[in-house]
Image (cartoon, helix red, strand yellow):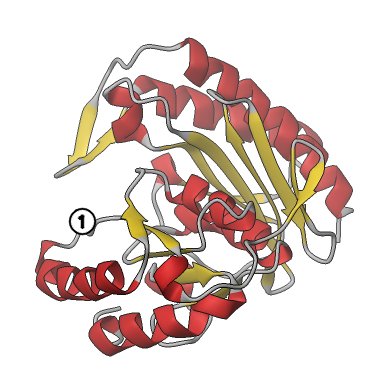
């Protein structure tokens, strides 16, 4: 396997280059992929740039990237890329978006980088090496009960048939916690769990590129991660729970009760 330090180095180079484009761009060439799901010229430009930088170093590697579509198939040396996570935010001038680059090989996500070009925050991790924000080690929030926790989530805009059960679940999470935030970038939500800004995060029916980098960053910071059934199938089914260990069980109990048959 390629040295993970080299994977991180190239990921940071690619993410920074794409981030500069995002920071300097205005939304244009907007296309509706599906209701409430958009692509812009910036998404495409950034994805091409990221892939080209990686291919210069690793010409034989594989890609699963948002603007190419496709589903997750386990294979070695697979880069899982979201060139602009939070496109809707970007279109509306809300400066909360990120570049997300994950690396999967030997049956697991081995490394990940998430870059917020507006705050200039780099989150990165590789398996067994800890998680870092701009070079400083980070970890999940200290143990607390769910009533003291701030929980992040997203809305099932791609799956309107899931909304009723999802909002029933969300209502119980809201009643049980200190508050809920819906920021519009799953990658940054996972990174914020890793940094202790959020105590937990859950969302359903995401794509692999929304989660891959964030999962390894959160895990290496001490988070527990599963799908809605308590299994590890989130890259396939898109359903994820990520939380500091002390609150994970309470979150899982509520989400599993309402949504285990929906993933």
Task: Identify which residue, 239 or 108, lies in the foreground.
Answer: 239
Q: Quadrant of residue 143?
A: bottom right
Residue at (49, 10) in percent of width and height: 24
- In what element is the residue under mark 1? loop
Task: Identify which residue, 121 or 79, lies in the foreground.
Answer: 121
Q: How many marks?
A: 1
> Residue 97, how many percent across, how many down?
45, 33
- Whether residue 31 is visible, yes or no, is yes
Residue at (39, 49) in percent of width and height: 69
Residue at (83, 66) in percent of width and height: 128
- Which quadrant of the rendered structure holds the C terminus? bottom left
> Residue 43, how many percent across, how many down?
42, 29
Q: Quadrant of residue 18?
A: top right
- Which quadrant of the rendered structure holds the N terminus? bottom right
The residue identified by callout 1 is 158
Q: Is residue 146 above or below residue 78?
A: below
Task: Identify which residue, 233 or 78, lies in the foreground.
Answer: 233
Task: Identify which residue, 91 or 237, lies in the foreground.
Answer: 91
Give the side of residue 217 with respect to residue 1, left or right: left
Q: Is residue 128 above or below residue 89?
A: below
Give the side of residue 186 with respect to residue 14, left or right: left
> Residue 119, how many percent across, how many down?
57, 26
């Amino acid at each position: 396997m390629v040295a993970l330090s080299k994977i991180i180095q190239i990921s940071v180079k690619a993410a920074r280059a794409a981030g500069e484009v995002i920071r300097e761009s205005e939304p244009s060439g907007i296309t509706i992929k599906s209701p409430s799901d958009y692509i812009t010229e910036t998404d495409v430009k950034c994805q091409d740039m990221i892939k080209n930088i990686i291919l210069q170093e690793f010409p034989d590697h594989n890609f699963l990237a948002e603007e190419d579509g496709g589903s997750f198939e386990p294979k070695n040396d697979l880069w899982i890329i979201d060139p602009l996570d939070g496109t809707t935010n970007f279109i509306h001038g809300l400066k909360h978006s990120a570049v997300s680059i994950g690396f999967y090989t030997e049956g697991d996500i081995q490394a990940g980088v998430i870059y917020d070009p507006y705050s200039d925050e780099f989150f990165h991790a590789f398996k067994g090496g800890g998680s870092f924000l701009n070079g400083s080690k980070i970890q999940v929030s200290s143990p607390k009960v769910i009533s003291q926790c701030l929980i992040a989530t997203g809305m099932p805009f791609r799956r309107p048939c899931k909304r009723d059960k999802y909002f029933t679940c969300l209502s119980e999470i809201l009643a049980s916690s200190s508050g809920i935030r819906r920021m519009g970038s799953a990658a940054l939500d996972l990174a914020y769990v890793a940094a202790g800004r959020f105590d937990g995060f859950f969302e359903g029916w995401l794509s692999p590129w929304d989660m891959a980098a964030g999962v390894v960053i959160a895990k290496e910071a001490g988070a527990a991660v599963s799908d809605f059934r308590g299994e590890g199938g989130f890259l396939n089914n898109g359903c994820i729970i990520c939380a500091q260990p002390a609150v994970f069980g309470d979150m899982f109990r509520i989400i599993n009760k309402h949504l285990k048959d929906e993933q």
